[in-house]
Image (cartoon, rainbow, N blue to C red):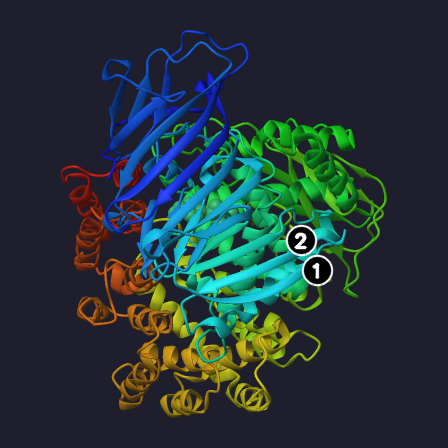
Amino acid sequence: MRTDTGQVFRLEDYRPSDYLIPKTSLTFRLHPDATVVTADLTIARRPGADRHSPLILDGDDLVLKAISIDGALLPASAYQATPDQLIVASPPDAPTFRLRLETEVSPSANSALMGLFRTNGAYCTQCEAEGFRRITYFLDRPDILSVYTVRIEAPKREAPLLLSNGNRQETGELADGWHFAVWHDPFPKPSYLFALVAGDLGAMHDMFTTASGRRVELGIYVEHGKEPFAAYAMDALKRSMRWDEEVYGCEYDLDVFNIVAVSDFNMGAMENKGLNIFNDKYVLADEETATDADFANIEAIIAHEYFHNWTGNRITCRDWFQLCLKEGLTVFRDHEFSADQRSRPVKRIAEVRTLRAHQFPEDQGPLAHPVRPRRYREINNFYTATVYEKGSEVVRMIRTILGPEGFRQGMDLYFQRHDGQAATIEDFLKAFEDASGRDLQQFALWYHQAGTPNLSISTAHDAAKREFVVEIEQSVPPTPSEARKRMMHIPLAFGLVGRDGKDFEHGPVEGADVENGVIHVRKRRHVVRFAGIAERPALSLNRGFSAPITLTVEQKPEDLFFLARHDSDAFSRWQAYNSLLTDALVAARKQAAFAAKLADLAGVIAGDASLEHAFRALALALPGEADIAREMARDIDPDAIFERREALARMIAQSNEAAFREHYAALAFQGRFRPDAASAGRRALRNTLLDYLAPLPGGAELASRHFVDATNMTDRAAALTVLVHRHGETNEAKAALAAFEERHGANPLTMDKWLMIQATAPGAATLDKVKTLTRHPGFTMSNPNRVRALIGTFATANQTAFNRPDGAGYDFFAGVVLEIEPRNPQLAARLATALRSWRSLEPVRRAKAREALQRIAGSDDLSADLRDIVERTLA
Ligand code: 0A1
Ligand code: ZN
């Protein structure tokens, strides 16, 4: 484990390396405790670099066994090797030389899951961001692009399968039952994209023919016996490959594309060139074990990693400050893919909910940072919702500003100019500016300034002048180390909706640039005057969520009720209803008439056959407890929020009981299971209705029947959730938990749902339940998926139990974080971010949460990962 050196990395300190590594040859002689890695590096001095500069290679926890240059062993006086660095003071003064290094690593002792480690008996690597330096000494930075040849040797019985990046060049037998394979990747790549997998795995094979006729062998490797569970992932892969050709003109470039699913993985998946490695949670699925949400995630993540082949691999990042160059862009691409494969409005609503749930709190708390950060202590902690999700929103805004054609031209130019390079955000923006002739200088602030901008909006209508006036005031809140902000360019999509539900055609506009239904907000204040508006319209704002901002709008509730039914933009219809629900929950509106109208509208939405099932399900789902807390912003009392939310749900259910029961019954479906969006939407609506009906008389029996009759995991998990969360003490709930365990006990991924459902049961008593579950034979602190299912969801999705006023939830959590940290610092640091919003709690809980954070901060020898998170959280 790397302990904290306190070193801060700054964007402005970027310098190109004095040395380059055009070619890398690696040989792995695999052994669980003593794998020998031989690296044969062709090293070149960068043209223009100082001839006397030493060669300094990165390492992490390495032991150097041998070193030679151009075939001659190096005397001890010529180099200095420590576990985290290798310095050759005076390398040869030749244009290129060969450095040969031998290191020895222990994959089985590697519990951090970075570098070369073991999972389920197989060997596997993870090198992003800085894991390659745990394999051999290297210039482990993304602007060092090298052509790799990799030879893997292993006992054939233990590891019949030997995989690395690129194309397989050679295989053969060796003495003593060993064998080898040689892989060559012709595309120069940074070390973080290197990968190796060796083991005894099952496979699903398929074929893809690219637009230009290249035949690509596809393979998905999984634990033996799990092959059929890879079918959906394979289908998603082929659809992704086709989509990237059709939408971006991006074709796959190697003869093989392999995916390996592993059960020990810190993140979702990794885009290593030609050899993606996945958390098996995002590969394995069938109706018996996976929910509709799992299917959608698999489709999205398979696409995401595949799309990285062009946005990330062919064009990579100059340095880690540019992480959003590959991540924000690739998330945008996977969002668009899912929108095309499924329902665009439903997908957009889901994206916005995720952004608000994960990125907004980050932007509004102590861990706020720009989409392109300027400094970091530990890069692992910057794989954040801001870099990924807000990064994607920024790309979406570029498309809104340029229009779809201008955007595509910008992307084409970006690919053309930077293929084979390590690029920056400036390069990316320049491609769009040059392709479109537009100035994106002010827009670039989206990459540089942290914080969620707010637009405060009021309107006035002058019937005599036939003028509608919209006053807009922009503010960007201060964030850590950025007190003063500059005004941003915010593309605000809007509509002026008339009584017939159609958008008014307006006359000339003054006060801001308005084009194609978008107001370009650029200043602190705009007074936008629309001419030719005879009647007062309802103002529909931020349609399609055109900008990742918050709005403070002086809006009459009648307008929101109207927009919720008639806005031509489906996202805004959802938003209008959601704003009304939020208003009711945040207690701004308590009048009975308001509540009754809200309940009526819920009934209308539930039964409106012109709306997709999935849309209705999303609209009917009340804002979550954390969403409500975010709206309240300070002195949060999670118990009070829980009660309010329950009361509103009950009120809506009671006043629509008959209709909800009828729709619920009508949605029952007996046909064959299909994971497509329409079928999933139907299940989602039925399960949402079940949740409403559950607290009413007969609720436990209804949920119990739903559970017993379920023919797929989506319905079974939904019913179990309702039983455990609302009727936890009943025999029905206990029986369902036991039946689930009996049926799925052997499948850890499915048992994660069982753990999650119990960890999120509301109420103080859940803490003891979670403690007990840590001793369940199916649970282990050493597997990241288990930890996230039980501990992660407890801390992030159980507002009442985690935030117990006695602080016992925080105390338990701090203990777990400290227990995990020595073996897996990355996992511990990610978990610890659950405490980031501690300052918005009411004073008693706030003090307890701070104590827990201080307890973590005060322990000795903290890893760089965890120390960075807790210190910034407390600062
Ligand atoms: N590039 C990956 C994310 C990723 C980052 C770090 C990792 O280390 C454990 C793993 C994966 C992606 O965007 O999917
Ligand atoms: Zn990614």
- Mark 1 or mark 2, earlier in chain: 2
Q: Which quarter of the figure is the N terminus placed in?
A: top left
Residue 772: percent from the left, percent from the top? 17, 70
Residue on which the image places disc 2:
543
Residue on which the image places disc 1:
569
Q: Residue drawn at (61%, 27%), measured in percent from left and top?
A: 426
448 relative to 28, above or below: above
Residue 786: percent from the left, percent from the top? 30, 63
Question: Which residue type does callout 1 highlight?
Answer: Asp
Residue 52: percent from the left, percent from the top? 41, 7
Question: Which residue type does callout 2 highlight?
Answer: Arg
Q: Is mark 1 within 8 Å of ligand 2?
A: no
Q: CA distance from mark 1 to mark 2?
A: 6 Å
Q: Is residue 809 left or right of residue 46?
A: left
> Which residue appears farthest toward the front when viewing the image?
175
CB contact under 8 Å: marks 1 and 2: yes
Q: Is residue 37 visible?
A: yes
Residue 725: percent from the left, percent from the top? 33, 76
Q: Which quarter of the figure is the C terminus placed in?
A: top left
